[in-house]
Amino acid sequence: QVQLVESGGGLVQPGGSLRLSCAASGLSFSNYFASWYRQAPGKEREFVAGTSWSGANTNYADSVKGRFTISRDNAKNMVYLQMNNLKPEDTAVYYCKAVSSDLIYWGQGTQVTVSS
């Protein structure tokens, strides 16, 4: 059974940092492109950051460039999202996604709230 489990969300003040983790099980994680998405209340889910199978290539949404960093550890079946200089508009549920060919898996999400 494939599972993606996110953790690390919480409440943080503007300008603060959080590190999200996504633990994958039941799949050969190194064969999957991994990414983070987020969904704010009343809005559609949007792409945040993605990484290639090896982690050598990454891409980011313009809104998070220079503040967020995606990384992965295939030996541990983990993908991370380091979020710095957080803003209130980063408040959302953050989801981990794994894709390989026509296989797509999502985690259940972790809430990030940026507020003073």
Image: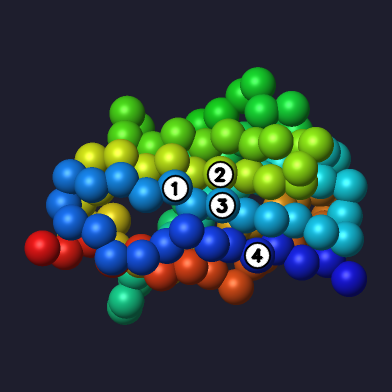
Q: What element carries label 3?
A: strand
Q: Nearer the viewer, residue 63 or 66?
A: 66
Q: Earlier in the sequence, mark 2 or mark 3?
A: 3
Three-letter amino acid code of the residue under disc 2 = Tyr
Q: Distance between the residues labelled 2 and 3?
A: 5 Å
Among the two numbered marks 4 and 1 on one chain, the one whose residue lies closer to the N terminus:
4
Q: Which residue does the numbered mark 2 point to in the structure image?
A: 80
Picture quarter with the C terminus: bottom left
Q: For the residues marked 4 and 1, what is the alpha-carbon distance in whole angstroms?
A: 14 Å
Q: Return the x and y of residue 105 as percentages of the image width and height.
A: 73, 63
User: At x 32% / y 76%, what residue is drawn?
Assistant: 41
Amino acid type indicated by mark 3: Ser
Q: What element carries label 1?
A: strand
Disc 4 crowd rating (10 Å Cα; few below 14, some 14-19, many 20+) is some
Residue under label 1, please give it.
Answer: 19
Residue 28 in the image: state x and y as whole percent.
Answer: 89, 47
Residue located 37% across and 43% down the image = 83
Give the amino acid type for the residue marked by disc 1 in the picture: Arg
Q: Mark 3 points at which residue?
A: 21
Reading the chain from its start, which is encountered first: label 2 or label 1?
A: 1
Q: Which of 10 and 47 is in front in this view?
A: 10
Whether the residues at callouts 2 and 3 have beta carbons within 8 Å, the answer is yes
- Marks 1,3: beta carbons within 8 A: yes
**Marks 4/2: CA–CA distance:** 11 Å
Marks 2 and 1: CB-CB under 8 Å? Answer: yes
N-term-proximal mark, 4 vs 2: 4
Gap in angstroms between the C-alphas marked 4 and 3: 8 Å
Q: What residue type is labelled 4?
A: Val
The outermost residue toward the top is 56
Residue 5's disc number: 4
